[in-house]
Image (tube, rainbow, N blue to C red):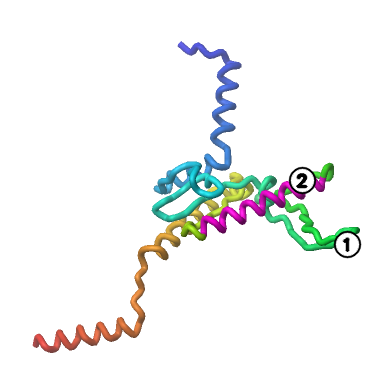
Amino acid sequence: MDKLSAQQRHANMAAIRSKDTKPEMIVRRGLWSRGFRYRLNHKRLPGHPDLVLRKYRTCIFVNGCFWHGHNVTESQMSDVRGKKDDVIESSECCKIPKTNREFWVAKIRRNKERDKEEQRKLAEMGWHCITVWECELKPSKREETLDSIAFTLNHIWLQDHGAKTIPYSQLEKESENYLKAAEGCE
Ligand SMILES: [Zn+2]
């Protein structure tokens, strides 16, 4: 017997749906289904990356376009008082409100600086960082974005571990030795 009223059920479904469509959840499920395994919100790493893939020494940040100022143009401009100041221009997915503009510009700028600083620290610790933007996860772009993350991860792994390429000259020498050895056997 279903004890939930239609209304309750509707509320539950809505809650589940909104949780599932969170950008971070899309990335988690997308990578999991492609065979990647990860840890979540690693508290001891700078910036608390959303996903941590130890095998790939990679941290993934899933960023909201507004809060992290995706694609905003930062230009050095002097204001009326002749003071040098960073000015941020809105982008397609980060529209800075006209009201309280200065407040938002300062806030987004701080967030961007912090992001940069945290990723610099992670790089120093030997981690790779991937930033996934919310706008890259809308339904029309989602699969392409997830495929490209998977591609990048595999590329990183190959660079870190595999692909021990033998220089061509050495390869030539080795095959020469091999031929000589083969001749010696005859
Ligand atoms: Zn964006």
In magenta, the rendered stretch is 101-123
What is the x, y in percent for residue 92? 73, 52
Q: Main secondary structure of the magenta part?
A: helix
Q: CA distance from mark 2 to mark 1?
A: 21 Å
The outermost residue toward the left is 186
Q: Which quadrant: the N terminus?
A: top left
Q: Determine whether 178 is above or below 9 in the image.
A: below
Q: On the picture, is 118 further left or further right than 53?
A: right
In the rendered image, residue 143 lying in the magenta stretch gets the answer no
Report the front residue among 186 and 161.
161
Pointer 1: residues within 10 angstroms few (<14), some, or many (20+)?
few
Image location of residue 137, percent across then percent down: 59, 47
The amino acid marked with disc number 1 is: Gly
Residue for badge 2? 104
Residue 37 shown left or right of residue 106 in the figure: left
Kindly indicate whether the residue at mark 1 contacts the one at mark 2 (C-beta within 8 angstroms): no
The vertical placement of 1 against 156, above or below, is: above
Q: Is residue 66 left or right of residue 16?
A: right
Residue 85, horizontal then vertical, whole percent? 80, 59
Under circle 2, the secondary element is helix
* Front label number (2 vs 1): 1
| Residue in view at x 42 percent, y 65 percent | 159
Vertically, is 185 above or below 87? below
Q: Which mark is residue 82?
A: 1
What is the secondary structure assignment of the residue under circle 1?
Answer: loop
Q: Position of residue 18 (x, y in %)?
A: 59, 32
